Each structure stands twice: as structure tokens, then as C-alpha cells.
Image (cartoon, rainbow, N blue to C red):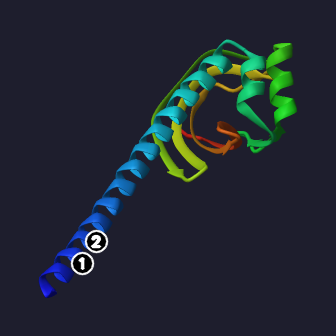
Amino acid sequence: MKSRAAAALFGLCFAFAIGLWGTRVVAQSSYDRSKEEIRALEAARNDAIVHGDAAVLERMTSDDYTFITLRGELRTKAEIVKGFATGAFKYASREISDLNIRVYGNTAVVTGRSTQKGTENGKDYSGDYWFTRVYVKDNGRWLTVALQTTLIQR
């Protein structure tokens, strides 16, 4: 009787441990998949900026988006989309690097570096800067909700 109880207890503990391990594997897989989705979104967003594709930027950005530029200006989604749609924002080149992506459930925080050549509203926006972008997963889609940039002084 004692051996059956011990075997049952061992089996229960073993099943519990396997369940915890399986949950961790699934969570890690979801985390890795989310990081890759965000990495692809960063590349697509960068491509849309270089090509002035306002429609893509419109789809990738939440309606309540805020952007603090490298000059300390506060911009909304409407201002960003309009800037690219009218050609007021033009970029000859823009490269992103040093991406660090952290995922917290339905929120992701990306830090990285950008080197760009371009103008916005007639102002030269060329240079190197660090950025922090925040994404939120809404109805199965990642949308950017905030961006903060800081110019790297040379």
C-alpha cells in the first residue's frame, strides 16, 4: 500500500515537473517569436521611413502614438503620417543597429541606434542617435505606441 502511494506521489510530482518545464518551453518559444516579430517590424518601419511610405507607417502606429524627437519636439501619429504623405519628411538613408528587444507579455521595449541622412520640415535631421520604442500587442498585432530619441553628440 505504501509503495503504491509513493509511486502515485512520484508520478504526480513527475507530471507536475514536466508540466512546468513544458510551460516554460512554450513561454520561451512565444517570447522568441515575439522578439523576431518586433525585429521584423523595426526593419519594415525603417524601410517605410526611407521610402516615405505613409500608408505603412499609418498601419504600424497606434492612434495615441507619441514621439519625442531628437530635438525635444513632441509629435503625434497624425503629424508623422502627414509629414511622410506630403513629403515634408524625407530620408536619403537610415540604418538601425544595436537592437535590444525585451518582451513583457503584450508589451515590448526596443532600444537601438540609428544613423540617418534626411530632413524634416526643412530641418536637417541627419546624424546618429539612440532610440527607445514601445510596442503593444493589440488584437494580435504589434503597434508602436511611443518613441523617444536622443542625438549622440560627437
Residue ID at (35%, 62%): 20
- Residue ID at (54%, 35%): 38
Which numbered dot is residue 43? Answer: none
Secondary-structure class at tag 1: helix
Q: Are marks 2 and 1 in contact (CB under 8 Å)?
A: yes
Left or right of residue 153: residue 69: right
Query: Depth check: 136 or 47 in front?
Result: 136
The image quadrant that residue 127 belongs to is top right
Query: Which residue shows up at 67% across the image and 20% down it?
Result: 49
The percent position of residue 152, horizontal first and vertical second, equals 55, 40
Q: Amino acid at mark 2?
A: Leu
* Residue 100 image offset from top left, x and y in percent: 46, 43
Residue 92 seen in render: yes
Q: Tell me, yes or no, if residue 88 can be seen here.
A: no
In the image, is residue 83 above or below residue 4? Answer: above
Image position of 37 with respect to 11: above or below: above
- Helix, strand or loop at label 2? It is helix
| Near-viewer residue (16 or 87) | 16
What residue occupies the far bottom of the structure in this picture?
Answer: 2
Q: Which mark is residue 9?
A: 1
Residue named by callout 2? 12
Q: Is residue 87 above or below residue 16?
A: above
Q: Give neighbour class at mark 2: few <14, some 14-19, many 20+ (Cα, 10 Å).
A: few
- Disc 1 residue type (three-letter): Leu
The answer to which of 150 and 24 lies nearer the viewer is: 24
Within the image, what quadrant is residue 121 found in? top right
